[in-house]
Image (spheres, grey):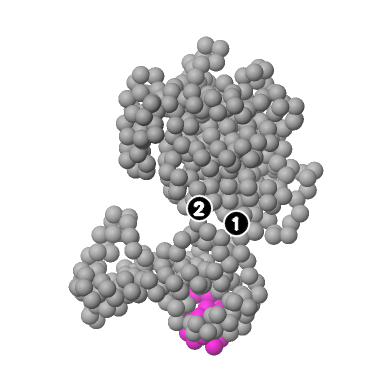
Amino acid sequence: MAKSIPRKYKFDPERPYCLVLGGGGAKGVYHIGAWKALRELGVPVNAFVGNSIGAIIGAFLAQGLEKELQEIGASIKLESIVDVGPDAAGLPDGAEMMSRIKKVSRSLARKGGLDTSPLRATLQKHIDEGAIRARGVDLGITTVNVSDLEPRELFLDFMPPGSLIDYLMASSAVPGFTLPKIDGKTYVDGGVYDNVPYEMARRRGYRRIIVVDVSGAGVNLKPDVEGSETVYVKNSIQMGGILDFDRTFLDRFTLLGYLDTLRVFGRLSGYSYFLRPDPEAEARFRGVASGLGAPLAEEAKRPSRGFFPDRMRLDGRLLLKCLECAAASLHVDRIREYSYADLAGEIARKKSEEEDRAARAIGSGEARGAARLEKLLVGAWKDGRFEKPPYFYLLLARATPAGKAREAVHMLLDRFFPELKAAEAWFGVDPKVAEGVISR
């Protein structure tokens, strides 16, 4: 579905795209990062179709308010969206905030919903409907008329003059917020009908479409891309929620939108990481692979099942695969742009950290044999939480007595962490060889 664009590809301004932006509340900051990447790439866009926060961001972009949008994204708080009362300055952050807001939302939903007048005030301050109409850029939004139980797909040229902000508020009226009225009809967030309105863009006649999906709540339909040139950008890491206004999350999710978009368009490469392509380093590494010993030398000649994760198995970029697997085994930060040398350096640093941590755990008696480690791994798997990096568990397993329990632990590690075999092989490469390959 996602079409990779060569790095030096020149986009034809006469063949612009329609940008479809999905709903997702606070997660909409991802759209800001994605737009920054599209601008850097020189991708021409002449139409915006969105739902909820996607509709609002689409309106800002249709008006050309990129700077204003970035400023809002960099400072947005919960009180920028809803009226949280006179004690807003003393509100808590993070998980405690989320818990309290959910309770308040349930309570106020019975009273008519949270007051969204701060959001309307922001739109009234920035959005100039006349300016958008004058620019001639297409803008479409989705919402649902709950009075008539009718979904509404509206483009600006079909909206009565002066109604755009009303429809933007209607599109973003998530359950729990005050539901706006237009001409006596009550409206709710279009996500209950179509959270990523790709089909709306198709029905408008667009065939060159970029979709940005932030995994927001609502109805997410699988797009039918036949007969189109569709580029699909979706957050590669699941994080945050629609009411998560933690500043660290917002900044990282914005950056993720930027990095994901660059990777989809081929400017960055990688699977879990974001790497600047380095074909010269790949060629040098393959050139020395025969002297690295098994199993890397064998993988360079003939890919085998089970050494790399299956999704990587046939990829010819041997060095990238080794770096990715080693980084994943150490929980190296994913939301960052790396050169090959940057990632190799971070891998070396994290590897040393985990070896020190494991040594302390073994010395303190925290690791009391393979049977205990097996129980720990099985428990973590059932809970869906492996708090420490896979390499740490591998080091503990190596320190346990030989026997069936230890063999079982290694089997569990191979099952849970398919990147470990390749990571171990990379850790066995002579550091001078690795440095000579990567750092030229």
Q: Residues within 10 Å of mark 2 (few under 14, many from 20)?
A: some
Number of the label disc, if any, that sits on residue 236: 2
Mark 1: secondary structure = helix
Q: Nearer the viewer, residue 163 or 364?
A: 364
Q: Residue at x 25, y 68 (%)?
A: 374
User: What residue is shown at x 70% (from left), y 41% (from top)?
Assistant: 45
> Looking at the picture, how far across and down is residue 439, in whole percent?
59, 77
| 59 is higher (above) or lower (below) than 438 | above
Could you tell whether 407 is left or right of 390 in the image? left
CB under 8 Å between discs 1 and 2? yes
Nearer-the-camera pick, 14 or 240: 240
Amino acid type indicated by mark 1? Arg
Q: Earlier in the sequence, mark 1 or mark 2?
A: 2
State yes or no: residue 297 in magenta: yes
Query: Quick one: SS at disc 2?
Result: loop
Question: Label 1 belongs to which residue?
Answer: 263
Percent across and percent down for residue 345 are 50, 72
Badge number at residue 352: none
Picture layout, residue 386 above or below residue 144: below
Residue 266 sits in quarter = bottom right
Left or right: 137, with 329 as reference point: right
Whether residue 313 is visible, yes or no, is: no
Q: Position of residue 107 (x, y in %)?
A: 32, 25
Q: Nearer the viewer, residue 25 or 159?
A: 25
Residue placed at 59% from the left, 35% from the top? 57
Q: Is residue 21 magenta?
A: no
| Residue bounds of the magenta highlight | 290-306
